């Protein structure tokens, strides 16, 4: 079910909602300061506030807010932007309105992927569905607190605009322990973490005994997610649904695949995520970037890329991921992708 309308919330309920509420940061801790219009229910001493009044949608926009999917992992190069784009195009293909927020404004991989799509569509006069896009550039302010305040304000403003205009909003995080990435995680309804099928990637989720493969303790990324989940549950009782998917799965290394799968299963119950098989190592997941396309677009007339058996397998992997995500309403539309 799509999340309830912010506009229909009572003042007290809305004050407890992370989208309606202003997000306040002190140097060491985050606070949500509830603000509705000019009706401040919290202290203003931390400065920045975003009001529900500012975020009111135009009259023709939908009145329910979008489901927010955050794609995050502290590990660089694990496939976050690739996965984000494939989730976006899947949802567009199912007929949903989709917003994209690229929090990695420095690399801007997702932003460039979508811009490439726009220019391919325009050049070739195609009728492909497009997401709306916001890119959050890194702040140019020198002072760290000011820079964080600036980035937070621009992110929250983009989010508030996108959540009223779309059914789903996908937030692509940078692969580092940055302020903006943590902030992104706190807004997740669903958190999707792609990881390469390797012990190095696994190490960011948990410390594992090298002989028994028993899980010794969660690593800092899992602890950070845990913190965001606790905080979110306190704010609006929402349980962030966390799905870890394996990416770039090898077609040959069955032994490693099995080991990682077993460890992930143990870990899943220990730190409460759901594990999904994810995507194989396939050229089709990377070769269409310059055109802004995915394998799901190849059936469209005029796209000019021929389907092969590997493409069929890739589509099946995407469909399985979309199914595993258990997003509201998506199950009935899975046959469209
Ligand atoms: N399933 C896949 N098959 C083949 N190549 C892939 C697959 N997934 C990702 N890649 C490639 O792996 C590289 C890293 O992917 P991507 O940029 O999506 O990762 P990221 O986690 O967003 O990285 P960063 O942390 O730098 O933002 C890219 O070259 C991408 O094309
Ligand atoms: Mg990226």
Image: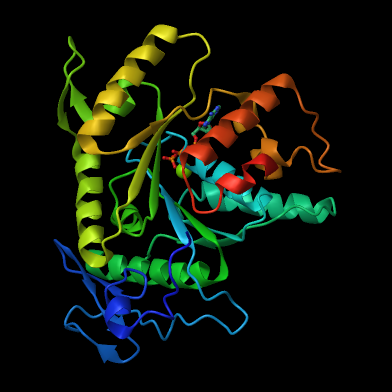
Is residue 220 among the parts visible in the rendering? Answer: yes
Q: Is residue 117 left or right of residue 163?
A: right
Q: Say if 44 sits above or below 111 in the image.
A: below
Residue name at image x 44 percent, y 9 percent: 254
Q: Residue furthest bottom?
A: 38
Q: Say if 201 sits above or below 212 in the image.
A: below
Count of residue discs: 0
Question: Is 107 in front, or is 143?
Answer: 107
Residue name at image x 63 percent, y 81 percent: 60
Question: Is 263 in front, or is 224?
Answer: 263
Horizontal and vertical percent position of residue 266: 25, 25
Question: Is 278 in front, or is 30?
Answer: 278
Horizontal and vertical percent position of residue 320: 54, 33
Colouring method of the image:
rainbow
Question: Is 87 in front, or is 333?
Answer: 333
Residue name at image x 66 percent, y 32 percent: 287
Q: Is residue 139 left or right of residue 222?
A: right
């Amino acid at each position: 079910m799509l999340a309830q309308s912010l506009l229909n919330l009572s003042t007290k309920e809305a004050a407890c909602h992370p989208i309606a509420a202003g997000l306040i940061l002190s140097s060491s801790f985050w606070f949500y300061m509830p603000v509705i219009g000019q009706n401040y229910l919290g202290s203003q001493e931390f400065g920045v506030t975003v009001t529900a009044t500012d975020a009111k949608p135009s009259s023709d926009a939908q009145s329910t807010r979008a489901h927010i999917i955050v794609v995050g992992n502290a590990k660089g190069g694990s496939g976050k932007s690739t996965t984000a784009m494939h989730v976006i195009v899947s949802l567009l293909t199912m007929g949903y309105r989709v917003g994209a927020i690229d929090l990695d404004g420095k690399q801007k991989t997702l932003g460039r992927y979508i811009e490439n799509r726009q220019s391919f569509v325009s050049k070739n006069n195609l009728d492909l569905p497009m997401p709306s896009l916001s890119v959050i550039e890194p702040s140019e302010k020198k002072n760290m607190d000011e820079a964080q305040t600036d980035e937070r304000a621009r992110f929250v403003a983009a989010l508030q605009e996108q959540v009223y205009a779309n059914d789903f909003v996908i937030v692509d995080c940078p692969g580092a322990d940055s302020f903006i990435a943590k902030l992104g995680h706190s807004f997740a309804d669903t958190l999707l973490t792609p990881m390469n099928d390797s012990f190095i990637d696994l190490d960011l989720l948990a410390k594992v005994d090298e002989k028994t493969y028993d899980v010794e303790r969660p690593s800092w990324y899992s602890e950070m997610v845990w913190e965001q989940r606790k905080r979110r549950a306190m704010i609006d009782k929402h349980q962030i649904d966390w799905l870890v998917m394996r990416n770039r799965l090898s077609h040959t290394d069955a032994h490693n695949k099995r080991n990682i799968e077993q460890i992930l299963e143990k870990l899943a119950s220990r730190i409460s995520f759901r594990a999904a098989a994810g995507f194989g190592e396939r050229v089709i997941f990377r070769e269409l970037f310059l055109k802004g396309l995915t394998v799901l677009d190849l059936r469209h007339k005029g796209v000019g890329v021929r389907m092969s058996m590997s493409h069929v397998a890739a589509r099946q992997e995407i469909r399985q991921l979309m199914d595993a995500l258990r997003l509201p309403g998506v199950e009935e539309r899975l046959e469209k992708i």
